[in-house]
Each structure stands twice: as C-alpha cells, then as structure tokens.
Image (cartoon, grey):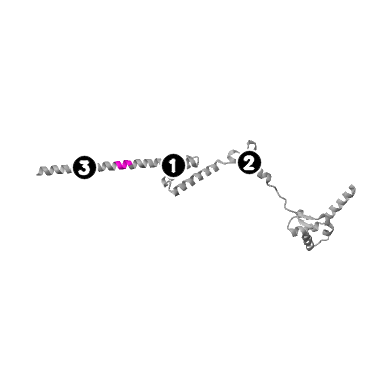
Amino acid sequence: MSGLDWLGSNEIRSSSLANLVTQKRLASSILKCGQRKVWIDPNEVSEISQANSRQDVRKLIKTGLVLKKPQASHSRFRTRQHAAAKRLGRHTGQGKRKGTSDARMPTSVLWMRRMRVLRRLLCKYREQGKIDRHMYHELYVKSKGNVFKNKRVLMEYIHKAKAENARLQALKDQAEAHRLRNKAARERRAQRIAAKRDALISGEQE
C-alpha cells in the first residue's frame, strides 16, 4: 500500500467514525458515562452506523462492538514513595519550607497536647487513689504554670512528693507518740506526787 492509499484509508475511517455521533451519544446515555468514554470498534463501523435506536445500540453493547472505556487510574505510587521518604526525614530542608516554624507546628498546639497529657495523667492517678484531691489541685495548677515539661517529669515529682509526705507523716506520728508518752509520764508523776501528799497529810492527822 502506497502512502497515498494509506492516507486515504485513514481519512475514510476517521470520516466514518465522525458520522457515528448519534450512536456515541445514545451509547453514552445507556452506559451512563461521557461520550469520550465510549469505545466503538473501528472494524465494524458500517454495522454500527446502521444502529439508529437505543435498542440497536444495546445490542451492539451486548455483542461487544460498543464498550465503556475503563476508568483511567491515577497512580499513587510516587506519592507514597515521597511520603515514605519524608517520614525518614528527606525533603524537609530549608528549601522545602514555606511557612514559619510556628505556622508549620504552632506552639499553641504543642501546649494543648502537653496539657492534655498531663491532665489525663492527673485524672487517672486521682481515680486510682494514688493522689488525693488536694495534691491533684496543687499539681493541676503547677502544670498550668509550666512547671512540668512532660509526663515523665510529672511522674517523678509525684513519687518524690508522696515520699516526702510519707516521711513528714512518719515524723508527725513519731512526735505525736512521743508527746503522748510524755503526757502519760507526767500524769503518772502527778498521781505519785498526789498519793505521797495524801499519805503525808493522813500521817500528820494521826
């Protein structure tokens, strides 16, 4: 086939496909898609051109001469690859940053996250009975005052505070016991003195 013959055959095929506007419109309505998604067999143009009703077009669809093109896929491979690299710290240098550091990760968001972590821990400890309501309130206010920078520091502070409270309570109990012993000793001494005094008075009267 010479070049002119090939060109002529292509022109005939394109003109015949251009005459299938009605069939393409009917097929797109039946297949519920756009006309650009309708595929028409270029080898059966003469048969398809004779279909001028919806019923005829349905027959063509059933025989496979008219098809609905598949959905063009939008690959996520490169996006996933880039995201995996960013998780490893790539593509995050100065040249890739558009906003300020506070715009990229606001300090208010970091503050809210930290406060919620600390307050959740305090609520859990209070419900479990590890701290009483007085210590809870004290630590709540300290957390709001930026005393604890993370949960570990708060837990260490709680352990130290509980140990210190236990030590002070032990000293208090010890001092109370010592005071009670001294009071009992004073009472016994007073009773002995009173008994001696009563004995002397009774002896003098005799």
Q: Name, please, the residue furthest toward the top.
A: 94
Q: Which amino acid does the dot numbered 1 rest on?
A: His
Q: Tag 2's secondary structure?
A: helix
Q: Which amino acid does the dot numbered 3 rest on?
A: Ala
Residue range in magenta is 174-178
Disc 3 and disc 1: Cα gap in Å?
46 Å
Mark 2 sits on what residue?
Answer: 86
Identity of the residue drawn at 48% across and 46% down: 121
Q: Main secondary structure of the magenta part?
A: helix
Q: Residues within 10 Å of mark 3 (few under 14, many from 20)?
A: few
Disc 1 and disc 2: Cα gap in Å?
39 Å
Identity of the residue drawn at 42% across and 41% down: 161
Mark 1 sits on what residue?
Answer: 159
Q: Tag 3's secondary structure?
A: helix
Label located before the other in sequence (3 or 1): 1
Q: Tag 1's secondary structure?
A: helix
Identity of the residue drawn at 14% across and 43% down: 199
Residue 129 to residue 61: above or below: above
Disc 3 and disc 2: Cα gap in Å?
85 Å
Identity of the residue drawn at 12% across and 44% down: 202
Mark 3 sits on what residue?
Answer: 190
Tag on residue 184? none
- Residue 35 in the image: x percent, y percent? 76, 55
- Residue 5 in the image: x percent, y percent? 89, 50
Residue 169 to residue 19: above or below: above
Q: Quadrant of residue 171?
A: top left
Q: Which amino acid does the dot numbered 2 rest on?
A: Lys
